[in-house]
Image (tube, coloured by chain):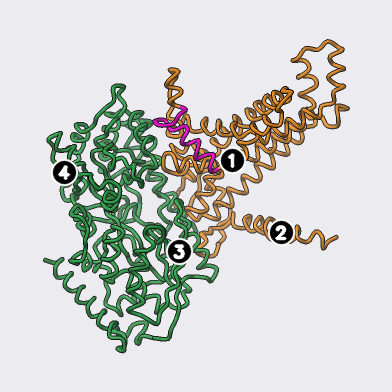
Chain colours: A green, B orange
Amino acid sequence: MRRTRLLALSSLAMLVVAAGCGGGSSSSSSSGGPATTLDKTPVTITMWDLWSGQEGKPFNDALKGFTKKYPWITVKQIVQPNTPNDTFDPNLINAINGGNAPDVAMPFGPDYIGQYCSTGLWQDLTPYMQADHLNINDFAPGAITYTNSGGKQCALPSLTDAFGLYYNTKMLQQAGLTPPKTMDELMADAKKLTVRNPDGTIKVAGFVPLNQWEELGPGDLANAWGAKWFDSSNKAVLGTDPGWAAALRWQKQLIDWYGYDNITKFFAANTNNEFNNSNAFQTGKVAMTFDGEWRTAFIKRGAPNLQYGTVPFPADASHPDQYGSSRVGGTIVGIPKGAKHPDQAWLLVKYLASDTNYLVQMANAVGNVPTTRAAIASPSLTLPPQFDVFLKAWVNPKSAFAPPLQAAGGGYANLLDTFEDKWQAGKIPDSQLESQLNTLDQNIDNQLTQGTAP
Amino acid sequence: MLLLLSPWIIGFVAFTMGPMVLSFYYSFTHYDLLTSPHWIGLDNYRFMFGKLTLNGQPNQGDPFFWTSVQNTLWIIVFGVPLRIFFGIITAMLLTRPKRGVNGYRTLFFMPSMAPTVGASLVFVYLFNPATGPINQFLGHIGLNQPLWFFDPTWAKPALLILGLWGIGDAIVLYLAGLLNVPRDLYEAIAIEGANAWQRFRYVTLPMLTPVIFFTLIIGIIDGFQYFDQAYVSSTTASGGVGSPDNSLLFYSVWLYEQAFSYFHMGYASAMAWVMFVATMALTAVLLLTSRRWVHYGGGLS
């Protein structure tokens, strides 16, 4: 009920905004905000983004709607290189500090949002949002977890990722299985679906539980037990929240069943294939996999004959309320400090974050989750039925960005990865798991302290 | 004169002296690029070497500093002598052939012309434990097949092999050194009835010591700065920087992570200065001891 009402409200707001702007001669629909009247002097604003290659054209097409809406604003796009080790944000910080800030910045991920909001490198959008009656709750409960830091709403989401379990329909049918709902079922099904070569190595893996495997992280497993990363005083609780140890033991049990060397070799054989047509799920080398919503588009392009389904990632039987939630987070958009035309920049930010036509057009073209409730409900969405799981995961109240943002950034998660390297390889005895997790907590706290050292 | 030197002076001051002085200052500050640096005394250095009190709370210090030091020492202790050893052997073999000498020399030099990043990527592919030709070969001859870049024990040896493959630059130096050994020394020792080993031990090796010394110093400095191969192979093979299990977390890699992933510019500057001091100290020690074993000047020493 609540969802429907919010939906109706936000689409109404959208209509009002659209009408106000589409009218051409009428002034802004906002009142008492940063810009009381729309300044229609022709102006050029700059935007940094990463939309290139296959996604470049759809983005440019979808951006035409903005030019139509605000014909006096020219958007000068500066497409940054999309490198594996994110250079967008360091370059942006340098540009801001050097006084060359773009008016709008649109990175593919919120990894630096903690720094951006807490230091004011990106402007707080709250006054603009209030003036235009745009609320972060119009998006989804999880939106605030990666666009707001230290109480400052310095970014808005613009399309996101959400995660779930993909399964190969044929393989499950042949094994007489239905998609797993609990972690115990996932374990049992993974074993049943695995096919080995005569020498014990893996031909088809039921489910690969390795930390390095594609999108899967220890946090995604721990989410099945509702495990928390930090307590209310922002201290790491991986050692004290029993969910972590439970998730890690689940993971280790499955790894040991495969044999660490076998599953590592299987991973090695498929490494770097995640985003091409040799992808293990698309080629039938894994029966079930944890993956993001974009895989639906990849399958459509690269393996159109694959019969597959999606379900939420299983939750442990002890935490059924976790079922349906997932890690979420994706492209964000905001106004850097020192932007030369902040008011016009806000119009673009608002468009990219909340224009239903834009979001629907982009979601259809690049296969990401549209981020407003209005866009999710739009009849113009042409996404496959398997996409529903991800739309629902996005609006699930338990979905959140992970690892949680810290003012010092997300680097602390590397400590967990190192821990996982040891744990998966059996270098941490089971009896020491809790005490080693406590040490990990200390290391995380230390690193975050160092990040905010005096 | 000053005018002729000015491009160098300007470059030196702007791109070497300036940054060095600044980084020395930053090493005593908390500096995250976002806000202006602010003075915290020796805290960065304390954090590096162990325990301290930060914000009134006990802090165990950098958990990976010593890991990165150990990894770096490993690659220096094994890498530098092996490069010298194989460099000399290969160079000596290359003095042998009568025909096609230039062809062979080009062949051996070629790997060191390959860009490090490209070479590292190729090695990750070659050493892939499941699909790579190296393990397929090892399997055919019935040997143990390590997980290479996916196993903390075997990741560094794989990088060592990469280093030995790209040994061409050292070979060229040794080759030049070998060809510079005066013939009359060999004639003299031959008259005294020396065998092949004695010829090597008492003529070739002493005459090569200046080159060995040079490659030793350069090798150690390169070892401290070991970065590209480790960064590329760890991120392309098993996922994260320094993985698996931080076995490829070398000093420079950790410094880079601190600076550009965590924005701990102050701490990274402190790390850079510790590396600088360590390199200088080691080089100074080697320079002092070199008088005992390095022979300069055409065999007259």
Return the x and y of residue B231 as percentages of the image width and height: 51, 43
Give the residues drawn in magenta, as a range. Answer: B117-134
Discs 1 and 2 share one subunit: yes
Real-space CA distance between mark 3 and mark 4, rounded to the nearest whole angstrom: 42 Å
What secondary structure is marked by label 4? loop
Name the residue located 70 percent from the left edge and 57 percent from the top edge: B17
Return the x and y of residue A450 as percentages of the image width and height: 47, 53
What secondary structure is marked by label 1? loop
Tag 1: amino acid: Ala
Residue A152, quarter of the rendered image: bottom left
Tag 2: amino acid: Gly
Up-down relation of residue A375 to residue B233 (above or below) = below
Residue B39, quarter of the rendered image: bottom right
The residue identified by callout 4 is A181
The reply to whether discs 2 and 3 touch (Cβ–Cβ < 8 Å) is: no
Return the x and y of residue A218 as percentages of the image width and height: 31, 43
The reply to whether discs 3 and 4 touch (Cβ–Cβ < 8 Å) is: no
